[in-house]
Image (tube, grey):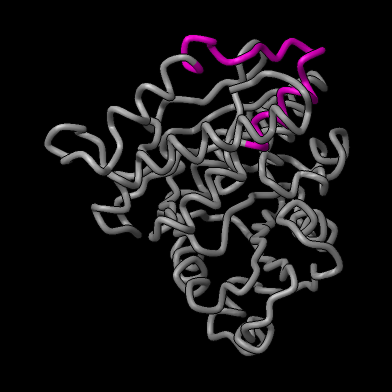
Amino acid sequence: MSRTPVLVSVVVPAVNATPVVDVQLTALAAQDYPGEFEVIVADNGSTDGLARHLSDHPLAERLRLRRVDAGAAPGAAHARNVGVEAARGDFIAFCDADDQAHPQWLRRLVARAADFDAVSGPVETTTLNSPRAAEWTPVNAPEARTEVPGLFPVAGSCNLAMWRSTIDKVGPWDVDCLRGGEDVDYCLRIQLAGLTLGHEPEAMMAYRVKSSYPALWRQQYAWAQSDVDTYVRYRDRGHRRRNPLLALAMPVLLVLRNPLLPQSVTKLPTGTWICYLAGFAGRIRGSIRHRVLYV
């Protein structure tokens, strides 16, 4: 049955986000959603003056902006849980502090969620990033979805929304997912609980990618380890291994397309090569940790 929220709560986990958070807050203030909404910044232990920055923010009234202290434990999952607890809305939308919602983002999410228990949207990397950084991490087409092998479609927490009744049934975000993957875990739990996850291609979020090689490595290495965590957690529920041919082909690709060769030969940006290498190394590290093979 179609539903319309009384109040939407936008939960934004943040840590040391003072230099970038105004881009997202300005974007949220420019939403064309006609209903009522509030914005909750869940501060996950910032030391850069974020609390002071938000205390008298010029958009505070427009956004019904509140900062809540989510510094008791590290991780975005904990911050989202604290934000949800503070939220007054019957519909909860999640986005990140360093991204930028397109003007129709919230309206499109809410409209699509009328017939689903949760809904995701796509991301684009052209708005907030240099062309060089954007090409490092290609993203799906707006209508495309990422699927966990053998299970369900999943989505990133930077563009995800759900009814409070969904959260009440599924429970809190898993605070043990400190390497990442808490969004994949939550999407799987939603659907394993018999609930539905829709997708709205027009609910676009501008995503900020890592702009340096070391930061890119750390992110991709951690995420790849979380892929193995997810496999171990859900293999008894149908999660399949990655294609073994990928494991055989990846070392060859990494050697033949390494950045010591001219890009005219490799046809691969250095940042993309780092993503591949970090992903491969992270899955090996995760496989060793769990004593499984998932590379």
Q: How many marks?
A: 0
Q: Magenta stretch containing residue 226, yes or no?
A: yes
Left or right: residue 285 compared with residue 280: right
The one nearer the camera, 39 or 42, is 42
Would you say residue 208 is visible in this rendering?
no
Name the spot of residue 121 as percent of width and height, x first. 50, 38
Left or right: residue 21 compared with residue 51: left
* Residue at x 84% of width, y 63% of height: 73
Q: Quadrant of the C terminus?
A: top right
Name the spot of residue 274 as percent of width and height, x first. 40, 43
* Residue at x 53% of width, y 50% of height: 106
Would you say residue 234 is visible in this rendering?
yes
Q: Magenta stretch containing residue 86, yes or no?
A: no
Q: Is residue 179 above or below residue 61?
A: above
Q: Quadrant of residue 138?
A: top left
Name the spot of residue 97 as percent of width and height, x first. 56, 64
Name the spot of residue 61 as percent of width and height, x first. 61, 79
Please, which residue is most extreme toward the left here? Answer: 264
Q: Quadrant of residue 147?
A: top right
Left or right: residue 39 compared with residue 145: right
The one nearer the camera, 251 or 124, is 251
* Residue at x 12% of width, y 37% of height: 264
Q: Is residue 5 above or below residue 295?
A: below
Q: Is residue 121 above or below residue 196?
A: below
Q: Quadrant of the N terminus?
A: top right
Highlighted range, magenta: 225-247
